[in-house]
Image (spheres, rainbow, N blue to C red):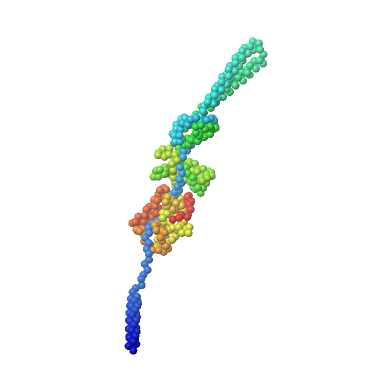
Amino acid sequence: MPFTSTTTSNKLHFASQKIVQFVQISCVASMICLLAACSKPVEKVEEVRPVRAVMVGAGSADVLAEFSGELRPRVESRLGFRVAGKIVARKVDVGTVVKRGQLLMQLDGQDLALAQVQSSAGLRAAESSRDLARAELKRYTELRAENFVSQAVLDSKTTAYQGAQASYEQAAAAQKNQSNQSSYGSLLADVDGVVTEIDAEVGQVVAAGTPVVRVAQSGEIDAVIGIPEDKVNAIRNISDVRVRIWANPNSSIAGKLRELSPIADPVTRTYTVKIALPNDVKDIKLGMTAYVTFAAKTATSVLKLPTTALFQDKNVTSVWLVEQGHVRLVPIQVAGSAGEDVLVASGISAGQTVVTAGVNMLKEGQKVQILGAVQAANVTAPVTGSDSTSTPTSAVSVPALHPVAAVTDVFSASAGVTQ
């Protein structure tokens, strides 16, 4: 019996503890439910993305296209000897500035000297034969006057003299020609210029007319570029041409279209264009890299945007428009490029606000905050050079973009501009 009483007491004590724990848990759950019922629901905070933007302006201005090339002489002569022979001397190197009449190369003159002696001897022999025929003709003329010889004899002497005179003239011409041939053993510069290439060396035997030295005539320099076939007709009608040198990009030189090749280069498939530069331009040298800019104005208005404003998705070029604090993705059509900016032909209009920084972090309908207040700028200044860029966006205000004229009629470009 005592054992049974103790076991029952323990069970009652354990049960009481469970009841107390259940009551405590129930009370805590009830309090949580009461607090949850009294509290307000948590509102979802919409993410606001800070961006930079510009207000688009409309107008018309110059549109540019720029091509790279190099400076070349307008006239570059490939000089060669007019007679065959072995080169025994070379007096110039590449880059040597030469004057007209200056010796460039020399041939071995032994054979030419012997030919000169031979022609001189032939001339003296022909002269002696002519003098003899003249003297005989004079004597037979006197004899005929005395009727000592017949007229037929006199006629033969006259014919002999005429033949001797012709032989003398032939020998004289041959001697003069050989004298010229001897002088051709010395290759002289025919113009003032600079040596651009050496095509033969001392000891080499060359044929007559083989080019051995290239001399670029000084004074006249062209900027030579290659243009694609879809720009040929447009370039032909443009008169505003400017040239910049890579060594001095801040200086612009007025140029003139001098030559447009009618045939495409078989290797590059581009058409060679030569732009004439003024003769008084300083600090330029042959072979320098040149950038030729063509400027043209068209009637159809387009807009200019920085490349950072473009958003590329599935081969479609778009921009983010800011409307009532939210962004909307709008596809556009790119008409071309102007420096570091692109030209927009359609898709947006003047007065709209376009995001220029942070385009890859946005999504449709997202709320944005523009860094600085968007202000409308007075759009009056045209884009007149390839170095012209849109007015930079500051942290306080976002100015409007400069307008540009449509490029589709003059300089067509691919619409697939990637970000």
> Would residue 304 be visible to someone looking at this image?
no
Q: In the rendering, at what x and y percent does residue 244 appear?
A: 42, 44
- Outermost bottom residue: 1
**What residue lies at 64% left-to-right and 15% top-to-bottom?**
154
Q: In the rendering, at what x and y percent does residue 87 appear?
A: 51, 31
Q: In the rendering, at what x and y percent does residue 214 appear?
A: 48, 35
**Left-right relation of 5 to 280:** left
Name the residue nearer the viewer: 312 or 152: 312
Q: In the rendering, at what x and y percent does residue 71 appear?
A: 45, 41
Name the residue nearer the viewer: 173 or 372: 173
Quadrant where the N terminus lies?
bottom left
Up the image or down, 292 lies above or below 206; here it is below
Count numbered badges in the picture: 0
Residue 147: which quarter of the image? top right
**What residue lies at 47% left-to-right and 30% top-to-bottom?**
103
> Would residue 313 be visible to someone looking at this image?
yes
Residue 302: which quarter of the image? bottom left
Residue 6: which quarter of the image? bottom left
Name the residue nearer the viewer: 197 or 325: 197
Name the residue nearer the viewer: 142 or 9: 9
**What residue lies at 52% left-to-right and 26% top-to-bottom?**
110
Quadrant where the C terminus lies?
bottom left
Up the image or down, 352 lies above or below 149; here it is below
